Amino acid sequence: MTQGADGSRVPLGTIVREWGRLGVVGFGGPPTHIALLRRLCVDERQWLSPEEFQDAVTTTNLLPGPASTQLAIFCAWRLRGALGALIGGLCFICPGLALITALSAVFLAQHPPLWVLGAAAGAGAGVPAVALLAAWRLVGPSRQRLGEERTSQVRWVLYGAVGAITAALLGSFVVVALLGCGFLEVLVRRTRSRPTGSHALVPMALAHTVGAAGLGALAWEALKVGALSYGGGFVIIPLMQHDVVSTYHWMTGAQFLNAVALGQVTPGPVVLTICVVGYAVFGVGGALFGALIAFAPSFLFVLFGARKFDRIRGNTTVGSFLAGAGPAVIGAIAGSAIPLGLSLHRLWQVPLLAAVLVWLFLARRSVVSALLLAGTVGVILALVGVNV
């Protein structure tokens, strides 16, 4: 257990204050969260060494689920053990959870104000562009992980194509595609050399369908988000989209776009998008239930696995699985842009989507600013009488 810079034990009140502050100001997704945690734990307080922090970043990126949330939980665990992990994790998650639940009540109201409809339609128009950007940012690290050999790069393209086609045409089978590509890469590498690490920490395939479109179905969606999302928070979109819109009809395509946009513009992890879905199904109770199921695996991974992080980093089977699942994740995120784009229901949203693409890819501005500006355009158009 790490002590403060003066050798004293870090008070739980300090964890409450600092992790709560990170949860409030953590706009911008995982890169922002990691930078804020590094500045707090390494640069300012010197609770962790730079090497230990970087090892934690590497290991949490090997785990399924929201990596930056797991990193926040791990850093709190290093300071005050299991109790610190629980308190730190909750303080990091709860500000964004409270805000996105409140916004869900506004955006999913039966008769929302006209300006709210405009903001939702404007921000929703930019979501397909955000999906493409999220996929693009993952390409470089994923290709390096799989290797530079020609056969490796061919497999990378094939895995990516499988993910993209599945997300675009067979959304309910995205989980199967991700797991299949991961396990296939494990088999390919095992034919070349015997694994030298410990036994595999590869996630088991879960039942793909849930019988009733109720609490059990919501639990399954939240579990997919929390336990089967690899390669960044945005992979939750292809994991959820087909079930939420087409299978259970909890939301329309436009409402799902709004849910994704809210998850991007609020602080905290992108996984909080599941709270909007939960609210659409069972109100505030559904939002809280979805969050509970989605974040439970992250707490369990750290509480029961933190002492084995060194073994996880060195496990060849884990690395092989992620090398195969990673490109499938990228393809699934990019492929999700197709059904997301088809959910746009107003003609003016198309040029707005093009403008967001320019803003993100050519001007290289932030996702938060892109969606806020797109939402502002939607509000203006709604107020001047354009159909939203």
Image (cartoon, helix red, strand yellow):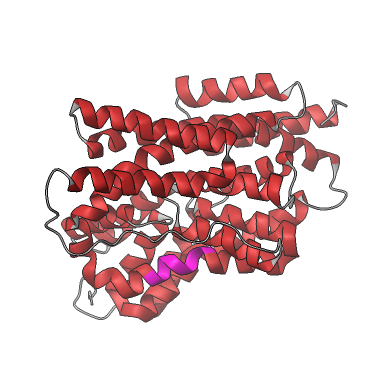
Say if residue 353 shows up in the picture: yes
Say if residue 370 shows up in the picture: no
Q: Residue furthest front?
A: 191
Out of 250 and 255, give the one closest to the viewer: 250
Image quadrant holding the N terminus, namely bottom left
Out of 362 and 124, give the one closest to the viewer: 124
Q: Is residue 334 left or right of residue 5?
A: right
Q: Is residue 344 left or right of residue 95?
A: right
Asked if residue 177 is positioned above or below residue 128 in the image, the reply reads below
Q: Which residue is at 41% across, 70% downward? A: 299
Where's residue 221, x and y in %? Answer: 58, 58
Where's residue 352, x and y in %? Answer: 66, 23
Image quadrant holding the C terminus, namely top right
Q: Is residue 121 left or right of residue 386?
A: left
Out of 151 and 142, give the one closest to the viewer: 151
Where's residue 166, x and y in %? Answer: 52, 37
Asked if residue 311 is positioned above or below residue 28 in the image, the reply reads below
The quarter holding residue 331 reads top left
Q: Main secondary structure of the magenta part?
A: helix
Q: Which residue is at 21% across, 64% downward? A: 199
In the image, which residues are magenta? 294-300
